[in-house]
Amino acid sequence: MHELSVLLGYLNLPLHLAGFATTPLELVSFILSVATVWLNIRQSHWAWLFAIISSATYGLVFFGSRLYGDMGLQLVFISVSIYGWYQWLHGDDRHERLPVTALDARGRWIAAVAWLAGFVLLAWFLKSYTDTDVPRSDGFLTAGSLVGQLLLSRKKIENWHVWIIVDVLYVGLYLHKHLILTAVLYAVFVGMAVVGLRAWQQAAGIGPGGDDTGDRRLVLE
């Protein structure tokens, strides 16, 4: 336990990079997270391994910033990543590689209601049982991230819509928390989510406006 505390102490030493302060732990988490999203765009199942590692490191970062919703979210992400890894490899009706698909209207409503219900529950819990100073923001974005991660695990195109919304709002939250490098990361995520949305729409044969182009054969390797 003492050795772990010493290691975490070194990983959280101040580090100045390109004019702003960060820590080695935040920097490593940054690199792993970018790699995760890039692999998601490419539909590589190895994205889930990077997701597990980056979630563990970011859990430590968020604990130090009293973002307990986000910290707990990383634990959920690790569990969902194991589920998602299996789904991507064996999750279709024939237990083969899962294809990219879109939600129907009912699925979109379920996702929206789940986000709202998660927000209400998490905001109440964070306000009542933690010392966070941003219970509503933390709760709303944590709930949205859970919805996005679950949609990602089933290769639903709408996961990118959720991530675009969440990532834009996270930039503001992390700037407020002085996690500058993480704010930069989420700004990068916004652009990557737009790229991911277009790539997955092409993979599913769906045009930018949601119309079916008729070509559903393309799968990114």
Image (cartoon, rainbow, N blue to C red):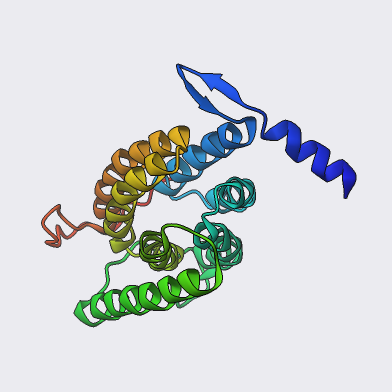
Quadrant occupied by the C terminus: top left
From the viewer's side, name the closer residue of 9 and 194: 9
| Residue at image coords 26%, 45% | 194
Quadrant of res 107: bottom left
| Residue at image coords 31%, 66% | 101
Quadrant of res 136: bottom left
Residue 42 visible in image: yes
From the viewer's side, name the closer residue of 2 and 87: 2
Horizontal and vertical percent for residue 10? 74, 31
From the viewer's side, name the closer residue of 191 and 177: 177
| Residue at image coords 61%, 62% | 75
Horizontal and vertical percent for residue 74? 56, 58
Is 148 located above or below residue 116 in the figure? above
From the viewer's side, name the closer residue of 191 and 209: 191
Q: Is residue 86 left or right of residue 102?
A: right
Horizontal and vertical percent for residue 149? 44, 62
Residue 92 visible in image: no
Q: Is residue 162 left or right of residue 69?
A: left
Is 71 located above or below residue 34 in the figure? below
